[in-house]
Every structure is written in C-alpha cells, then in structure tokens.
C-alpha cells in the first residue's frame, strides 16, 4: 500500500524556519520539499499563530502551531482552543504517516494522534535522548539541557520512544 501510493505525510519540526537550529532544521525543510515532489506533505512547526495552508502539487503545506519562545526553545500553546484547532487540522488532512524529528512536545502531540488513529509514527533522532547530557552543548536546546538529567524526563522520553512505530 505505502510504496506505490501517494501518501499524506505529516512532517514535524521544532524549528520555525530553515535557518534556525543549524543543519537539522535545513535538512527537515529540504525533506519537506523533496517529499512534496511525490506525496502530499503537511509540514508542522512552531508559529506565531495557528495557521493551516494545504499542500499544493509539488509544494508542502504548512501547519503552524501557535507557540511561545525564541532561539532554541519553543513550546506549543496547549490551551483548549489550540488543541481543538490542531485536532481539526489533523482530522482534515488525514495523514497516512507521521514523521517527527527528535523528542518534543510537538512530536508527542502528533504521536498521541497517530496512536489514536492507528497510524505509523516514524521518529528520526538527531540526538540520542538517553544520552542528552553527553552531546555537545551547542547541539542541545537549553530546555533539554535543563531537564535532561532528571529521571522523570528520561522516563517520558523512553516511553515516547517505545510508543514510536519506527526510528531512524
């Protein structure tokens, strides 16, 4: 089914633009463009407001999720109105597969939606979550550096990994 079909792909980044966050951000933005050459891609990432632009032939759409923060740290708006808006956007797009980059609140929201709809959730790791403190400081968001040493955070990350369909 998945090899021959044109799929609806939800691709998730924690970065609001391709020039924020170094190589990972550039890679994910380029991946969205490349996948849109064959599939319908909806690219979810932080934004100043909730906004949905549907994919067009050869171009990814965008699902901007209202977020707070700057620099390395972005946190999605989790008020009920934003949650309902996100669920409506995902229900309208109907992704066949969800592909997230690293552990994040954005990925966890989409993972819950994927599990509730029995869809594959692919996770690409750019940092090994259980060894966050050993990674170079310039590669880690500040929030991860602050929380990464705690056992509760490690438990959340490991549970997230276990609930993923596949990891690269």
Image (cartoon, rainbow, N blue to C red):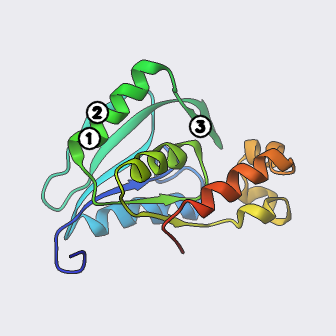
Estimate how packed mark 2 is, as few (under 14), some (14 to 19) or many (20 or more) residues with alpha carbons within 10 Å: few
* Residue shown at the point (48%, 61%) measured from the top left: 26
Q: Which numbered marker is on residue 88?
A: 2
Specify whether residue 49 is in view. no
Mark 2 and mark 3: Cα distance apart in space? 22 Å
User: Relative to residue 150, is residue 119 depicted above or below?
Assistant: below
Q: What residue is shown at x 54% (from left), y 75% (from top)?
A: 168
**How far apart in space, not on screen, are marks 3 and 1 (Cα)?**
24 Å
Q: Circle 3 is placed at which residue position?
A: 74
Q: Which of marks 2 and 3 is nearer the N terminus?
A: 3
Q: Where is residue 16 in the image (x, y as percent from the top left)?
A: 48, 43
Indicate which disc, 3 or 1, sits on the residue closer to the N terminus.
Answer: 3
Please say if the residues under marks 2 and 3 sit with CB atoms less than 8 Å apart. no
The residue that label 1 is drawn on is 91
Total tally of numbered discs in the picture: 3
Viewer-nearest of labels 2 and 3? 2
């Amino acid at each position: 089914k998945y090899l021959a079909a044109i799929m609806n792909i939800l691709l998730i980044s924690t970065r609001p633009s391709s020039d924020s966050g170094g190589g990972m951000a550039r890679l994910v933005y380029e991946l969205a463009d490349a996948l849109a050459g064959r599939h319908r891609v909806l690219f979810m990432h932080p934004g100043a407001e909730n906004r949905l632009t549907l994919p067009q032939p050869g171009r990814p759409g965008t699902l901007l999720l209202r977020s707070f923060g700057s620099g390395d740290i972005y946190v999605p708006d989790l008020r009920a109105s934003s949650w309902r808006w996100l669920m409506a956007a995902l229900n309208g797009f109907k992704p066949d597969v969800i592909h997230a980059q690293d552990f994040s609140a954005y990925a966890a929201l989409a993972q819950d939606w994927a599990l509730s709809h029995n869809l594959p959730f692919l996770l690409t790791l750019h940092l090994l979550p259980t060894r966050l403190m050993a990674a170079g400081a310039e590669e880690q968001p500040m929030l991860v550096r602050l929380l990464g040493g705690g056992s509760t955070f490690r438990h959340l990350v490991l549970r997230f990994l276990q609930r993923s369909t596949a990891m690269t």
